[in-house]
Structures are given as structure tokens and as C-alpha cells.
Image (spheres, coloured by chain):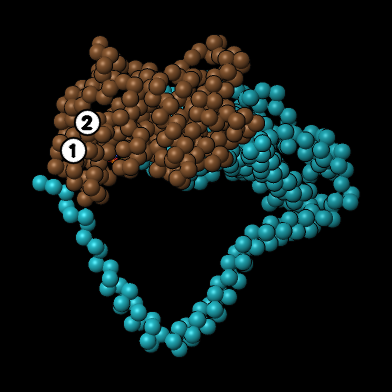
Chain colours: A cyan, B brown
Amino acid sequence: MSLPPAAAEPPGGAVPTGDGNGGGVVGRVPARRGGRAMFRGEWVIEFLIRLCGWSSIICVAAIFYFIIQEAAPVLPTMDWGEFFGSVIWRPTSAVPRYGALALIVGNLAVAIVAMAMAVPLGLGAAVYISEFAGPRVRETMKIAIEVLAAVPSIVWGFIGLTIISPLLIRYAGAELGGNLLNGAVILALMSVPLIVSISEDALRAVPDSYREAAMALGANKWEMVRRVLFPAARNGLLAACMLGVGRAVGETMAVLLATGNVVQIPHSFVDPIKTLTATIAAEMGEATPGQPHYQVLFLIGILLLVITCAINVIADFIIKGAKAKANA
Amino acid sequence: MNSSISIDVRDFNLWYGDFQALHHVSVEIKPGIITSLIGPSGCGKTTLLRSFNRINERYGNVRTTGRITILGKNILDEDVSVASLRKRTGMVFQRPNPLPISVYENVIFGIKSHTPSSQLGRRVLDEAVETALREVSLWEDVKDRLKSRATELTLEQQQKLCIARLLPLKPDIILMDEPCSALDAAGIERIEELIGELKRTFTIVMVTHNMAQARRASDECIFMLMGEIIEHSATVELFGSPKHEKTGMYIEGRYG
Ligand SMILES: Nc1ncnc2c1ncn2[C@@H]1O[C@H](COP(=O)(O)OP(=O)(O)O)[C@@H](O)[C@H]1O
Ligand SMILES: [Mg+2]
């Protein structure tokens, strides 16, 4: 017995010959024509690709433009001190008051509490799925997470109303089922699938050689996760969390059903609140286009846009800062 | 404990799923010398080397029988602490794989996970880093860049760093899987030189597919073929007068 003789030459010799026939002899003129057609096609494709790229910027600009246009008439007469400083929101009274402070605080509070639950849960689940689970468990969990991600937000709202409300009244001492904590739990459940799937991708993208390096130095798995995978996957993990935050800040239907919709600054986790998003959704139907109430709702829309943009920009800075620090 | 044997392998078999990659391997590796593992690609060199620190276990489908005794203890026993085994048997990989953290953190990665942090003052760590980097003659190159990312060094520097980060753990054995295959000629020369110096302190087992390197750098050679050990002798002997016909054919370049 011995090794097979140095692997037989692959039957590759035939390939260039066949090719030469097609492209060489007959090739000249058609090749030119093909070339020109190719050129025209390429131009169209390049244009379309450019358009795709620019469309994102055009869309953002258009969104800002239209929303600002709707809100514009009210801007000169707006009492900004009241808008940002007062908690009195009475858009339909004889002397309308547009104090949005409680809405802003409510919106941010529910998002922050939601993230305090969703980020650890989501990162933990992602680490488990990517580093600890066997292949079968991993596949099952990934399917479950996809299903969770596909649950419509109105259904999450129902869950808040029918399942979490009674639990909070019974065990957390809430007077009303709809409150800050209820909304936050729902938002956390909604953001977790997003955080898990993106974090898991980020962790799986870390080269295996890093894992082996750490393990060969005697590190246990948890150390490897903490000291190698987290730093290596930091940008992806941060992006995952930021997308979670974005979802929590912008979510409407579920918080409309789950937060109780009382315009007030919450003093406990089980106080009902109202968010900016829920306010727009609830009041847009009754507001008359062209009237100040309608325009102020659009102003709130601008505010939401600004908040989410700011979150993204901050995330960008954190990522860049981390990179710069790592490269310093 | 027999101090004239560093790694004692007895009738060791290894399967990846249904595929048996190592067949009845028995071999004694001596301390304080460089032993090369040679043989054609796919013959099981890497597999055998990765069995010595049990890092192969991370593939779920690995099954073994037999014994591997390292410094008097069968490392395949249930009660062996894999962490302390890996502390004593460092590993250098085929492609330099410094961790994506700073040079400094790379060097102390190991001691940090084996020593309670109360014993690791700034001074202790600084000193460990300098000693380790000097030992691989990397200190002068990187002493001003200790805080920069290790992945930004040249490949040769990265591989030296990968050796340096083993040293603070004071291993007995260093396992190397084709440690030069990613380097250029000058890099190969300097790493080989370094390996030659390390053998004064450590037992070194090095996989190589480069005959000339095995010949230059090692004291003993183990020739493997299709998961079996064919011949184990002093390098001069193995290359000068191979005992086995297949060894002769291989070193003449008749197999891949
Ligand atoms: N993780 C693995 N799963 C299945 N088969 C493997 C795995 N690693 C190596 N093998 C197989 O085991 C044999 C020996 O591989 P290896 O030890 O890498 O050889 P060498 O290092 O000598 O080239 C090869 O046939 C290879 O295909
Ligand atoms: Mg190999």
C-alpha cells in the first residue's frame, strides 16, 4: 500500500483549446459589438446603482421636507418654552396648550427602561446561541427568534393589555395595567429579536482563530467571550443595540395599547405615561389639516426624527471613537 | 514520573465523526529538544499536535482512545484541568493570531486568566511584558507601541508576539503548527533562530511540511503517513539513512 501517485493532472488542457476556438477565430467582430452593447448596458446599470445609493439620501431629505412643510405654519407662533418646558398638553381646549415635556420624558423613559432589559437579555441570548448552544438548539432558537421578530406590533400591544397588565397589577402594585413598565416590557420583547440576530451575526463574524488563541492560552469560554469576542465584535454589538433603541423610541401601536396614555412625568415604574408616538397616532385622526393642532403633531414628528437621528449619530461617534482609541 | 520523556503517547486513536484520523499512535517526545512532525498534507500532523493541548475537543465530533501522558499525567483523564494543561503546553498557530487587542494586553492575556488579579499589580505586568517581548527580540520594535493593536504589526512581529504571550505562563512545552508558513524568507530565518533559542528552556514540538526546515531546525523527526507514525529518529539519521522505505520516498520528495 502506498499513497496514490501525485494526483493526476486535472483534465484542464481541453479548456483553453475550446475557449480559443470560440473567442479567437470568430471572435473579432462579435466581440466588438458585444463590447459596445456591454458598454451601453453598463451605463444603464451604473446609473440605476447610483440611483439606488442616492435614493436613501433623497428619501431622508424628502421626509424632512414634507414633514417640515406640514408643520411650518405653526413654527413662527410656537411658544418653544411651553413646548419643551410644560407638561400641560391640551390641544383641544378653548385656549390650546402644547406642552410636550411629559410626552418627551415618557417616550425616553419607556425606551430606556426597555433597553435596560433588552440589551443584557439580547446580548446574553446572542452569546449563548453563537458560542454555547449545539447546532440543533441553535437552529431552533434562531427560528423562534425570527418568529418573534415577525409578530406585528399590534399583537404585542394585545399581549401587554391582556397578559402583562394583570401581572403588573397583581405583583408590581400597579393601579392601572397600562403603564411605563408594561410598555417597557413589551418594547424589550420587541427589540430583543433584533438585538439577538444582529449581535449573533457580529459574534459569528469574529474569526475562529481568535477563539483558538484564547482557549489555547487556557482561558475558559466565558473569559473568551468577555475578553476577546466582545472587543472584537464591538461595533456590530453596538449597532445591534442602537437598532434596538431606534425601535423602542419609534414604536407606536404597542405603546399606545400598553402605556396607559396619561400625559404626566412618571415618578415610578408603574405610573401610566404617554409617548410622542402614541400622541400622534391617537390625535391625528381628530386634528384638522391646516390647523395648529395638526401642525404641532407634525412638529412632534420632526422631534422624533431628530431624536432618532441623534441616536444614530451618537452611535457613530462611539464606534469611531472606539476605533480611534484602538488605533491610537 | 519519567523525566526523560516529555510527551508519552500510547496507542492513541482519534476519530472525527466516523473518520479515523490517527491510528494507534505511540511515540515518546523528549524534553529540551525540538521534535518535528513531518509528513504529507492530511496525514494527521495538526491533529496529533492539537491533541496535546486538547484544543481539538472544540469540534464536537472528536472521539479518542488511548493515553497521552504529559509530565506524568494522562491528560485524557476526566479530572484533568484543561486550563492548567494549556498553561503548561503553549501553542503557536499556522497563521499568526494575535488577539484584536493591544500588544500589551496580548502578552498578559494568559497570566490574567490564570492569576488572581490581586497579585497582578501594574509593575508585575509591565515587567512580564518587557521580559517576554525581549525574549522574542520584539521589545525594541514595539516598546513604543505597546498600546496599539496587535493586529497592526507585521506578520513576523505578530508571530513573535504569539510566542511571547506564552512565556509569562512559564510553559514546559510549546506546540507549533507550521509556525513559519505565513512568513517570507527573512521572517522564517529569524523565527527559526528564535525557536532554536527557546529550546534551551522548553520542549518544542513543531509541525512542518518543509523538509529543509525540519532538517535545519529539529533534533528529532517523526514521520507520519495517513494517520500512522512511520518513523521516529534523530533528524540526522532520518534524513541520512531512513529506516523505512516510505520515509526515504517522502524525503526524496516523492509524496506531496
Ligand atoms: N475538524 C475536522 N473534522 C473532520 N475531519 C478533519 C478535521 N480536521 C482534520 N480532519 C481530517 O483529518 C485528517 C488529518 O488532518 P490534519 O491533522 O489537518 O493533517 P495535516 O496537518 O497533516 O495536514 C485529514 O484527512 C483531514 O481532512
Ligand atoms: Mg496541518
Residue A105 to residue B7: above or below: below
Instruction: Give the class, few, some or many, for how many residues have Cα within 10 Å of label 1's Cα (few <14, many ≥20).
Output: some
The quarter of the picture where residue B51 lies is top left
Chain letter for mark 1 = B
Percent from the top left, x then y, of residue A320? 66, 41
Instruction: Tell me the amino acid under the disc marked 2.
Output: Ser
In what element is the residue under mark 1? Answer: loop
- Residue to which mark 1 is pinned: B242
> Which of marks 2 and 1 precedes in the sequence?
2
- Residue to which mark 2 is pinned: B233
Percent from the top left, x then y, of residue A201? 47, 43
In what element is the residue under mark 2? Answer: strand
Instruction: Tell me the amino acid under the disc marked 1.
Output: Pro
Residue B50 to residue B123: above or below: below
Q: Residue B220 vs residue A224: left or right?
A: left
Residue in the foreground of this view, choosing between B35 and A103 = B35
Q: Residue A80 vs residue A170: left or right?
A: right
Instruction: Give the class, few, some or many, for how many residues have Cα within 10 Å of label 2's Cα (few <14, many ≥20).
Output: some
Q: Are marks 1 and 2 in contact (CB under 8 Å)?
A: yes
